[in-house]
Structures are given as structure tokens and as C-alpha cells.
Image (cartoon, rainbow, N blue to C red):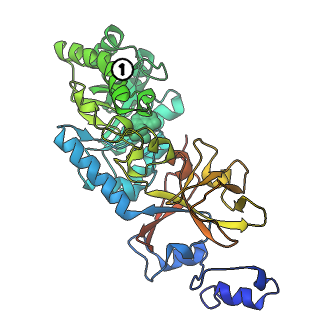
Amino acid sequence: MSSEKISRRRFLQTSSTAAALWIPAGVNGYTQQELLSFASEEGMQRDISKWDLDTPSLCLDLDALEANIGHMQTTVGRNGIASRPHAKTHKCPTLAKMQLQSGSVGICTAKVSEAEVMFQHGISPIMMTTTNVTATKIKRAMALREANPEFIQATDSEQNARLLSEAAGAMGLTADVVIDVDPGGHRTGITPGQPALALALLIDQLPGLRLRGLLCYDGGSQHIKGFAARRLRTLERLLAATETFDLFNRNGLSTEIFSGGGTGSYNIDHETRGLTDIQVGSYVFMDAQYMDIGGKDNDVQYADFEPALTVLTTVLNDQYPGRCTTDAGAKACTINRPWARVKGETGMNYSSGSDEFGTLRYDDNPSRTYRVGDKIELIVSHCDPVVNLYDSLYAIRGERVEAIWPISARGMSA
Ligand SMILES: Cc1ncc(COP(=O)(O)O)c(C=O)c1O
């Protein structure tokens, strides 16, 4: 008998332990398999409430998502730059298409496998912001460029540029590249100024490459608390990239693309002279890591974007005072900090240090408490690695599940 035909209430009433348990009325409960059979990517064929979802499950609030994408596009448009959203955040072609439809000039990817998946799903304007250094990955990237003329590859050394040019030349291609310039964090990129100029002049001479410009992403700026401090650091860190942009221009080199920035600096980056587009990622979903950095008009909370991505979890145990245990631990939420937060509630703290179990601890005055079988909605800790734990997400309008979107590049880490 399917779970549609026998409600959980009825099941519990007929089971021996029913008296001890309380389950909200009217909740059916469906397995993911059942839901997949009800849904097409375009839409769910019947009315399913998010409270019917099996847990742990990844949920996306469509109203919040649309507001986030809309706010980003309005802001960059007003500031005279563009967005080139980073697909490392969502790994979901449906979302990438929404971003492009809203006016983004392209998407970014962090991995060649991510780029391949996006292209397989019909997305062409892709800039890969990570260098590919091994023969295997260089070959893959150039094969992708052969299939997709809108693919742009980042490079940050003369040796790497020569290898890319050789691989492109062997396929009879002229591949598009941007130079990754280090903002000072030494994670990736070439030193700005003369070293970057020397690389650009080399690329200009290499038969297999075409220079399209530069990128400079300062991850360290993004989560600085307080708008004024974040603005200062963002602009300071990008100064050398602007000087490099000027050097390229003075030497007749392409600066068609000067990309950088992220969710924390989206309304600051246009002040960096020359910058053409921002590689924003987390803004689509938001997360607990970003909620505390404070915005331009709100020192405490970063309320520019709404938390759209949540994990739905079920209470497994409520027998002990001051706490309950759920079914969403590290494998559903990661162990990133700050921990996930209970949406819309106060006076309680969630943690997901155990593999399979989450712990909710109540303060002195919690806004509510939970019973076994109750569902709890959690704002994710850090969106990128949480998304990477799920094969698909539930797209939800209000409380109704509208669609199931595959996270097609999930696990594409190579
Ligand atoms: C190169 C690069 N660009 C853009 C982003 C997006 O940043 P955010 O999620 O803060 O918008 C990241 C995130 O780590 C990144 O590594």
C-alpha cells in the first residue's frame, strides 16, 4: 500500500506505540521516489505540501530566490556593471538558466566537470575561474572549448599558458583565456602589475590563445563584518588589479572582461574602476555565514538577500529536557560554522556535528519546542557544500512543492 493511501496518523493509531506519539494532522508523507514520479522538471502534477517531504531534504523558496535574483540584477544594472554568477554555488542548470534569463552575461564554474555538465544542459557562456594544470584537465578544458566557443579558461602562469596554447593548437583552436590576478591572498593568480603584463604579452603572441581580459577575486573581503570595513578592504585589494587593467590597456591588450567580486561586495565592486562584472554565488540562496556580516543599511544583519535554501529535518527524539534530536546531521548539513539556524524561531541553537543526527538545544525562553515527528526548517550554514550533498532540491512556492530540480553537477569536484 502506498503512503498516499495510509496516512501516518492512521498508521500510528494502529501501531502499538501510537499513544506516545503526536503527528500533525493532514500530513501524508511521501518518499522521494514517489515525488519524482509526480513531478516533471517543469512542475509537480499534484498538490504536495513541503511538510509532506521525506527528510532530510533540501528546499528552495521560489519567492525568496526570485527576489534575490531580481535584487542582484537591479543593483548591478543601476551600477553600470554586469553579473556573471558562480555556478559552484548551486550546481544546478535550471538555476543557471534563470540567472541568464534575468540578464547575467554568463556563468562561472570552479571545475571543468561542472562546466561540462552546464554545457550538456544547454548553457554556453561559461568562464572557468580555476586554472587547469594537469594534462588530463587541460585536454578536457580544450575539448570543451572545441564544443563550446563561449567557454573561457582562467590561467595564471606562463607555463600554464604555453600548455593551454599547445593543447588548443593541437585541436586547431584559438582558445579564449582570462588572466587570474592575485588580490594579495596568494591562493591563486599571478602577481598584478609587471608579472601579469608579461603573461598577457606572452598570451597575445601564443598561436593557440586569445586574451579576453582578467579576473581578480578576493574571497577574504566577502565576509568582513560591517559595510564600511568591507568596502575599504574590497577596494584596497582590487587597486592593483585596476592598475593591471590600465597596463593592459596602455599596451593594447584586451580588457573586455575584468571580473571579480562576490555576494559580500556586490554593491561595492562597481567602485573598482574598470570592473565589468561580478562573480556572485551565494546571493541566490544566502546562508548563515552571510547573514551576520551586516549590510549597507543594517549593521547587524545582512538582509539584502533572503535565506532561500533550507534543510527540512524531522525530530527523532524529544525525551530529554532542554533538547531534541533530529535526522539532519553532518551528512545533511555539513559541519561548517556558524551552524544552521532554525528558520523563524528564536531561543534555540542547532548543531550538526554527528554524522546522522542533529541536536537542537533550547535556551531559557525558546519561541517554541518540538515533539517527535515534528519537522524543522533550517537555514543552511554555508550554501555551496550543503548543495553538494543532495541530488536534487525541492522548489517550493509558499508551502506547495512546485518542482524537483536536479543538482546535476553535484559531486563534480574534478
Ligand atoms: C573565484 C570565485 N568567484 C566567486 C565566488 C562567489 O562568492 P560568493 O558566494 O561569496 O558570492 C567564489 C566563492 O568562493 C569564488 O571562489
Give the answer, above or below, for where 142 lies relative to 203: below
Q: Residue 273 sits in which quadrant?
A: top left
Callout 1: 10 Å neighbours few (<14), some, many (20+)?
many
In this view of the protein, can residue 388 be seen by the observer?
no
- Judged from the image, the secondary structure of the residue bearing numbered disc 1 is helix
Identify the residue under disc 1. Answer: 237
Relative to residue 344, is residue 62 drawn left or right? left
Where's residue 64, x and y in %? 37, 59
Where's residue 81, x and y in %? 21, 37
Identify the residue at image location x=70%, y=71%. 372
Displayed-image quarter of ligand 1: top left
Q: Quadrant of the C terminus?
A: top right
The one nearer the camera, 362 or 331, is 362
Identify the residue at image location x=71%, y=59%. 323
Identify the residue at image location x=23%, y=40%. 82
Where's residue 364, x and y in %? 65, 55
- What amino acid type is highlighted by mark number 1? Arg
Q: Quadrant of the N terminus?
A: bottom right
Relative to residue 72, is residue 230 drawn left or right? right
Give the answer, above or below, for where 52 lies relative to 336: below
The one nearer the camera, 33 or 126, is 33
Q: Is mark 1 within 8 Å of ligand 1?
A: no
Where's residue 382, x and y in %? 52, 45
Q: Residue furthest top?
A: 194
Give the answer, above or below, for where 171 lies relative to 197: below
Identify the residue at image location x=60%, y=69%. 375
Q: Residue furthest front?
A: 364
